[in-house]
Amino acid sequence: MSEIKKIVQQPLFKITSLNSIHILLKLIFGFITSKALAIFVGANGMAYVGNFRAFLNIIENFSLLGIQNAVVRYVSEYQNDKSKLKAVLTTFGLTLLVSAIVISLALIFGANYLSKQIFHHSELYSFVFYVLAILFPLYVFSTFCISVINGLKEYKKVIYIQLISSSIALLFSVFLIYFYGTIGALISLILAPVFVFFVSLFYLKNSISFSDVFSPQFLDFQIIKNASEYVLMALVSGVIGSFVILKIRTNIIEVSGLKNAGIYEGLQRISSYYLLFVSSIVTIYFYPKLAEINSNIKSIISNYLKTIVPIFALGLIAIYFLRKLIIQVLFSSEFESMESLFLWQLIGDLFKSISLIFGTILIAKKLTKAFIVTEIVSLFILYFSSNWMLHAIGINGIVKAHAFTYFAYLIVLIIYFRKTVR
């Protein structure tokens, strides 16, 4: 009994429990949104939503330039030094503002071109890019605000922000999808981070002020120089990685058809829901600990592998046996062929969950060369194996390539960290 009490009182257990509630609600919200998409936009519309999500990841990562990881690290490091903390917030805040404005202008002038590229030679969705251009600064600063709160190690606040903003986003998503179909679904993707921004401001009001972020006199270019390695890592992982994902989705449309691309997107939505459990725990709890100068890497890895991964693996087994029911509940009869894709997707996601902690160490400890090499190798394997297997065996080849890629990626990381984990 005392052992159980000791476990319950551990910070990781408390954060995991609260996060599990968040994930459960996120799953419920995801179910409602996915069902609305399946009913009102179908597999074809789902494919467009998937392409636009991939595009949003590209421009978000390009505009953030990896600064979100640097913010977490430096805010965590300087949270007790007000002058250095203000320099960090101002430097990154002004950098993001300039970056967001540049991207917004590019979106305005390139709306028609982007619509044709993302939506299969159609200019019907140019309006979506104008909306994105207007809201993009708030979109970017939502990530900045979450990174600041995360750096301050206010884990519960991060989860509360996600819960509240997700609830608001759900209401708007269902409304927009019901009345405006595919365009409404695309607009809802833009609005979700905007809600995060406003909710984050409420929780940050007693921690930092407007002058802490936008005071040019505190601008410190040395901080930008120190964060340059984060920028390189972000360009490889975020921008290039998202571009590869977008290209794979485009290949699916061209080789296997728009409907199969929509079915694949539906599977990726399911994957993103359960991966939230792992990725959010790593971001909220493990990354700030790894970012500390004297962190015990071996202990952190052991803690992750012994506590989080086994729970996640059991969840994946349950999902596999319930896959037919999940498809029926989340989607419609149009998505029945998704059932054959589950096994290799789940296997790949298990490898991905294990490799996540090692990849996070590379970022937290600024092991730039190792990060870039492993990312480029994994992206190279993912793209070419996906392309080859898509042409060879169709849509099933994509999920097999996914599993193969993350198995190879995990093996490379284990070899790199072999001395650390002994």
Image: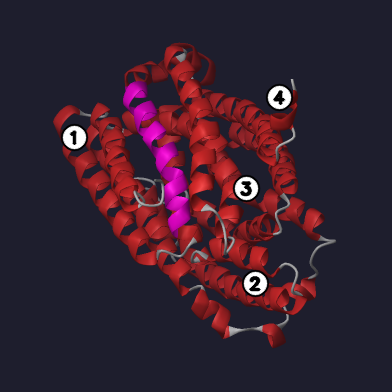
Residue situated in front as seen by the camera: 356 or 386: 356
| Mark identifier at residue 421 | none
What residue is disc 1 on?
389
Picture quadrant where residue 16 is located: top right
Work out how far the residue at label 2 is from the one at label 4, CA to CA, in angstroms.
Answer: 44 Å
Percent coordinates x, y for residue 365 in the rendering:
48, 62
Residue lying at the far right in this picture: please name it: 206
**Disc 3 residue type?**
Ile
In the displayed structure, 308 sits above or below 214; it is: above
Q: Which residues are magenta?
A: 341-362
In the displayed structure, 18 sits above or below 81; it is: above
What residue is disc 2 on?
93
Magenta region includes residue 126: no
Work out how far the residue at label 1 is from the one at label 2, CA to CA, in angstroms.
Answer: 43 Å
What residue is disc 3 on?
284
Disc 4 or 3, which lies upstream in sequence? 4
